[in-house]
Image: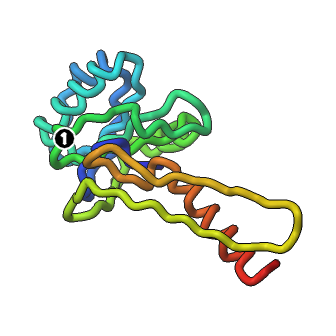
Amino acid sequence: ACPVQYSPAGVGRGRLVYLGNEERAEGLAVGKGAVGMLMPQADLYRRQALARELERRGLEALIVVSPLNDLVNTKIVRDPTLTRMPVITVPYAEALSLKGHEGEEAEVAVKGESARTGRSQNVIAEIPGTGPHWLAVCAHYDTAAGAPGATDNGGGVAALLALAAHFKGRR
């Protein structure tokens, strides 16, 4: 699971409620005390409008299902106007498992920085060698304003740091 772009930081706890798609979710009376799981079918704008409405109703947290078995799409709902309700995305395969826990207590936590500066930094590491071959390994860690940057290639950055530690001191 990953937070979606622009998800507010926070913790949402409550009874797990399967919302279905946008049309079904609009007709459900869910809010306070519930963590909703949405299987989106509509376009981005309708998903965003629904997320705002669910937050207005007091939904504690929202889990949005990515349509592919092993993919998390952190841009599946990206609404910078959400202020309280943490929103995460899970792959379809994980959603099938979660659906089996409908009605049980669930918790969604999104951690974030308290102050957003809007500044970025580049990190460049070079390990000089003596042979005729060279290796370049790249990763990026960036984000849109107000969004958790680790969702945009955080795994690549972690791999890059692990490789740098592995090659440190080798020639």
Is residue 91 toward the left or the right of residue 36 in the image? Answer: right
Q: Residue at x 27, y 20 (%)?
A: 45
Q: The residue under label 1 is which amino acid type? A: Leu
Q: How is the image coloured?
A: rainbow
Question: Across the whole image, how many numbered discs are drawn on residues?
Answer: 1
Q: Secondary structure at mark 1?
A: loop
Q: Position of residue 33 (x, y in %)?
A: 20, 48
Give the residue at mark 1: 82
Q: Residue at x 45, y 49 (%)?
A: 151
- In depth, the one of 101 and 24 nearer the eye is 24
Q: Residue furthest right?
A: 132
- In depth, the one of 169 and 97 nearer the eye is 169
Q: Position of residue 14 (x, y in %)?
A: 27, 51
Q: Position of residue 93 (x, y in %)?
A: 58, 38
Q: Position of residue 26 (x, y in %)?
A: 23, 21
Q: Quadrant of the C terminus?
A: bottom right
Q: Residue furthest bottom?
A: 169
